[in-house]
Image (tube, rainbow, N blue to C red):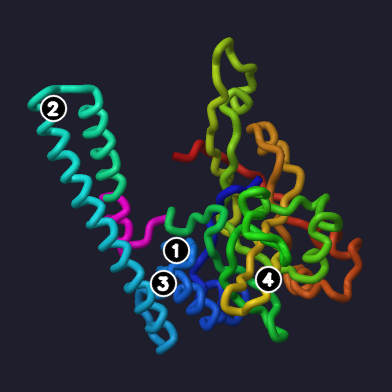
């Protein structure tokens, strides 16, 4: 499962590289809905598109980002004030009568303070760093679809919730940010052959058990330990990864688009590291054929997925 990935999120660069139109109206809507307290997660990589707005549309989105950040800063500062007050009380108790409860309370508050300070620093930071482009399930990211006859960059949520499914689907089927190639014509029948897109990745992350990674059995009384591996394609800067997507919700005000990355069996260097899936990486010349699936048979669509680029992947243990 490609549970996390580094995504190319500069929409202007994507537009130039892939000759695609940027749908600023949909981007504005996502930032607006986040400000209206909808549970929408947006990475700093997507926000960075509007650090230096030029058009009136871009300036309006920048205002919405600033408004959201101001609210988050206010909430975090209020939380810090309360935590510092709890530490004062804990210190007083420790001075009068040292107890494990007061010691634990102070330690918990100190950890929470550090986390909130880190969040504050991250919100206030405008200088881009590599991790700003990393997405996780339920994060919104830019994808390329065919809209009104042209390639269009639109924001979508990374975890596909099919139409008609209840919101609880996200919890009951937490792995639907990926769609297995061998399930496309089965479970994903309503999307496959109808709603296709691509997302541009730089690398991706997978969870593996440490003992599997080290090619050994668990020791007596040893509990499984999770490792996060980052897989990086060699000799290329980007991976054109096919997706399927759909629109959830009948009410336009509450509806949203979401997607799943298509995966397949991994190459040897990934399976030997302990993981059993890998995103598919299609060729640039096949993008338009993939984005226009309606007149194609399943066999023709699978042929596009199989006519793929197969780079060698190196990996490292991620923090």
What residue range appears in magenta? 117-130
Given contact means CB atoms under 8 Å apart, are the residues at marks 4 and 3 in contact?
Answer: no
Q: Is residue 139 left or right of residue 90?
A: right
The answer to whether residue 220 is left or right of residue 55 is right
For marks 4 and 3 on the same chain, the one whose residue lies earlier in the sequence: 3
Secondary structure mainly formed by the magenta segment? helix
Q: In the rendered structure, does residue 121 fall within the stretch colored magenta? A: yes
Crowding at dot 1, Cα within 10 Å, few <14 / some 14-19 / many 20+, comes out as many
Find residue 115 and report its horizontal and vertical position in percent. Answer: 31, 46
In percent of width and height, residue 285 lies at 74, 69
Q: Secondary structure at mark 2?
A: helix
- Which mark is drawn over residue 264? none
Pointers 4 and 2 in contact (CB under 8 A)?
A: no
> Which dot marks residue 94?
2
- The crowding category of the residue bearing disc 2, from other C-alpha atoms within 10 Å (few below 14, some 14 to 19, many at least 20), is some
Tell me which label, 2 or 1, sits earlier in the chain. Answer: 1
To which residue does mark 3 refer?
A: 35
> Where does the image place residue 40, in percent across and percent down from the top left?
49, 64
- Spatial CA distance of label 2 from label 3 is 42 Å
Residue located 60% across and 34% down the image: 208
Callout 2 touching callout 1 (CB < 8 Å): no
């Amino acid at each position: 499962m490609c549970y996390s990935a580094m995504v190319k999120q500069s929409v202007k660069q994507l537009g130039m590289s892939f000759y695609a139109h940027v749908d600023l109206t949909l981007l504005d809507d996502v930032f607006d809905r986040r400000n209206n307290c909808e549970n929408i997660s947006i990475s700093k990589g997507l926000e960075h598109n509007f650090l230096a707005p030029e058009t009136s549309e871009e300036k309006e989105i920048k205002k919405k980002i600033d408004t959201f950040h101001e609210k988050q800063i206010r909430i975090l500062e209020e939380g810090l004030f309360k935590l510092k007050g709890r530490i004062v009380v804990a210190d007083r108790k420790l001075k009068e009568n040292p107890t494990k409860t007061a010691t634990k309370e102070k330690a918990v508050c100190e950890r929470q303070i550090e986390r909130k300070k880190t969040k504050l620093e991250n919100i206030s930071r405008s200088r881009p760093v590599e991790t700003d482009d990393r997405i996780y399930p339920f994060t919104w990211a830019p994808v390329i679809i065919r809209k009104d006859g042209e390639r269009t960059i639109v924001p979508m949520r990374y975890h596909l919730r099919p139409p008609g499914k209840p919101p609880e689907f996200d919890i009951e089927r937490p792995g639907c940010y990926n769609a297995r190639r061998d399930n496309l014509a089965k479970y994903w029948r309503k999307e496959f052959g109808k709603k296709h897109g691509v997302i541009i990745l730089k690398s991706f992350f997978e969870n593996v058990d440490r003992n599997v990674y080290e090619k050994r059995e668990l020791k007596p009384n040893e509990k499984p330990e999770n490792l996060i591996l980052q897989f990086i394609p060699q000799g290329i800067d980007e991976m054109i990864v096919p997706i399927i997507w759909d629109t959830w919700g009948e009410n336009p005000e509450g509806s949203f688009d979401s997607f799943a990355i298509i995966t397949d069996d991994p190459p040897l260097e990934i399976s030997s590291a302990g993981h059993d899936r890998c995103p598919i990486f299609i060729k640039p010349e096949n993008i338009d054929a993939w984005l226009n699936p309606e007149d194609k048979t399943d066999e023709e669509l699978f042929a596009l997925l199989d006519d793929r680029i197969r780079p060698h992947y190196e990996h490292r243990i991620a923090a």
